[in-house]
Amino acid sequence: MPTLPALPAADDLLLNLTAFAWFLVCWVGYSFYAHYKGRDTACLASVLHLYRKDWMNRLLLRDQRVADASVIGNLERNTAFFASSTLLILAGLITVLGATDRAQSLLQELPFVATVSREVSELKLLVLLGIFVYAFFTFSWGMRQYNFASVLLGAAPLMGEKSVNESERRAFAERGARVLSMAAHEFNLGLRAYYFGLALLSWFINPWLFMLCTAGVVGVLYRREFHSDVLRAMMVTPTRFNDSGERNEEG
């Protein structure tokens, strides 16, 4: 009876390179897919952008904007929390990188962890380090963009201000919503890096498991961004404003 060919060992260089290439294809490919599909398909990003436009239009109808400043501040604090948490993760990874031999010996005591060389373990740690460096830059840039949104809030025209016409008000609402959506996009990219960083942890166990977890992360992200329950709950017809500033419901 013919025997099936054996699968490559977990320490096989070609297998590890293939797993890493699959990881990059899934991450970069899904990012492009989500960006372009979101242009003509309802997703969390596109629906929330409509809500941000409604928010900015309503903001211009009230003089007291303390609640709006509080909401933007809360969004900024959430982003700052992840940025500071990422720094702690980076500090831990650098510490582990300086003690690779000890970390590798601890991992190899587990029965289900594949035995690999020290160089391969260091390569995996460097990739993980790079992911969280990228996450820190995205979170910090998103935090700055929320600061820009706070400046826009302070510059918002007051209700009844005679020197500002309706077209200028609509343009301001569009700019404000755009800046908030850009900040949220950076926050989303940082969270996505966390998701794929967690998937990469399985690479220390086995490259085959790593590829499976990477595909699983793509599936989770796709479902949450395009088919989640919260998306269906938010998919109502947004309020639109006519030229006189009065709102009307479409649909």
Image: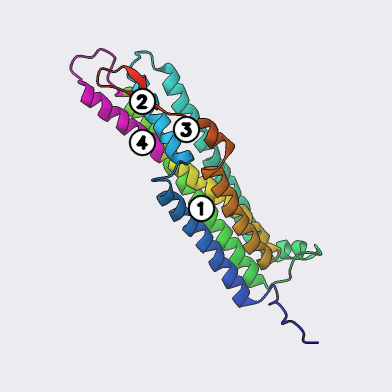
Indicate which disc, 2 or 3, sits on the residue closer to the N terminus.
Answer: 2
Q: Earlier in the sequence, mark 2 or mark 1?
A: 2
Q: Amino acid at mark 4?
A: Val
Name the kind of residue labelled 1 in the image.
Answer: Val
Q: Main secondary structure of the magenta part?
A: helix
The spot of residue 37 in percent (x, y) is 43, 49
Mark 1 Cα shell of 10 Å, populated few (<14), some (14-19), many (≥20):
some
Q: Are marks 2 and 3 in contact (CB under 8 Å)?
A: no
Left or right of 88, for residue 236: left
Residue assigned mark 3: 76
Tag 2 residue: 56
Q: Name the residue beneath numbered marker 1.
A: 133
Identify which amino acid the numbered label 3 is placed on.
Glu
Residue 127: image quadrant is: bottom right
State the residue at coordinates (77%, 66%).
108
What residue is pinned by disc 4? 179
Direction from residue 2 to residue 121 in the image, left or right:
left
Q: Position of residue 198 (x, y in %)?
A: 63, 53
Q: Residue at x 29, y 24 (%)?
A: 155
Which quadrant is the N terminus positioned in? bottom right
- Label 1 and label 3: CA atoms lie apart by 19 Å
